[in-house]
Amino acid sequence: MAGVSWGSRTRRPGAWAWQKRAGVILGLCWPLLGQAAAYLFPGNLPSGCSGSAGTYTCGAVTLAAGDTLNIVATPTTISFTSLNVGSASINAAGSASNLTLNVSGMLSASAGAIVKANVNAGSVSSTGAVSYGGSLSTTTGAVSLGAGTTVTGALTTTTGAITLLTGTAVTYTTVGSISSGGTVTLNSYNSVNGDLVGYLVSAAGHNNFGGSITSTTTYVSLGGYATVAGSIYAQTYVDTGGNSSIGGSITSATSYIDTGNATSVGGSLAALGTYVDIHGSATVGGSI
């Protein structure tokens, strides 16, 4: 093909046109490289998954940002060796009662993720605000939830530790209820809508409890500025911290009760082991 010469340079129109066509093709294909996956059970299953009729088995699955995982048949049970949800969504438009996720290893998720299922996992670790539309449970594994996370149902462990990380006044972590044979730690700005039961209960300030609090083995410490709708029972001591509001009674089976300054208790105080320490401006509605 003849070239066109400008001074000492020679350009070939055919080669130039091919480069432009290649650029156009690359531009059209580029959005496809980051396209999110839409997984469907049954139908389009992630790699390593198999099964039918509402029962599926998967290996280790990692979802990418924007991925969706949905179900057709209900109820459905999916078992994983591990599941990294990332910021993807699972059964977002469905009902948690129709989907059970059994994860033998770790379930992990990050801010923006939606998991509308009842989850049984080896352990749970989530960072940032994650929405769990059902219940979360482990046996011996730990559960750690990031600021702003919501768990609509119960949070349960047999012996695993439960930790709700520090939030802010506008990013409370909220769970339906807690029952654990392990330690329960609430950093600041968390909320438990129902009852809380733990081996021990240790909380920082500014936490809300919609039910009662029970420590089955040791103590309850609330850290101040706590609101408890129900009663508090501990095997050893109870320390409410200052500026707390307790709707019911407080009982220490073997040790002491410390109310903290400016704390109000609607019911009675019963320290069956040692003493009751009522700090300045604290009020008690029942017997002592």
Image (cartoon, rainbow, N blue to C red):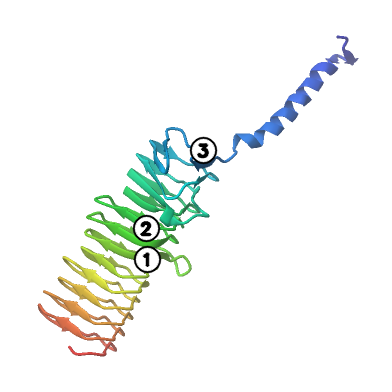
Contact (CB < 8 A) between labels 3 and 1?
no
Mark 2, other Cα within 10 Å: few <14 / some 14–19 / many ≥20:
many
Picture disc at residue 176: 1
Q: Is residue 200 above or below residue 268?
A: above
Q: Is residue 279 left or right of residue 2?
A: left
Q: Residue at x 22, y 80 (%)?
A: 250
Residue 198 against residue 212 in the figure, above or below? above
Label 1 element class: strand
**Splitting the image into 4 quarters, where does residue 282 fall?**
bottom left
Q: Disc 2 marks which residue? A: 135
- Please tell me whether mark 3 sits on a helix, a strand or a loop: loop
**Gap in Å between the C-alphas at discs 2 and 3?**
26 Å
Q: Amino acid at mark 2?
A: Ser
**Does 154 sit above or below residue 58?**
below
The amino acid at mark 3 is Gly
Identify the residue under disc 3: 43
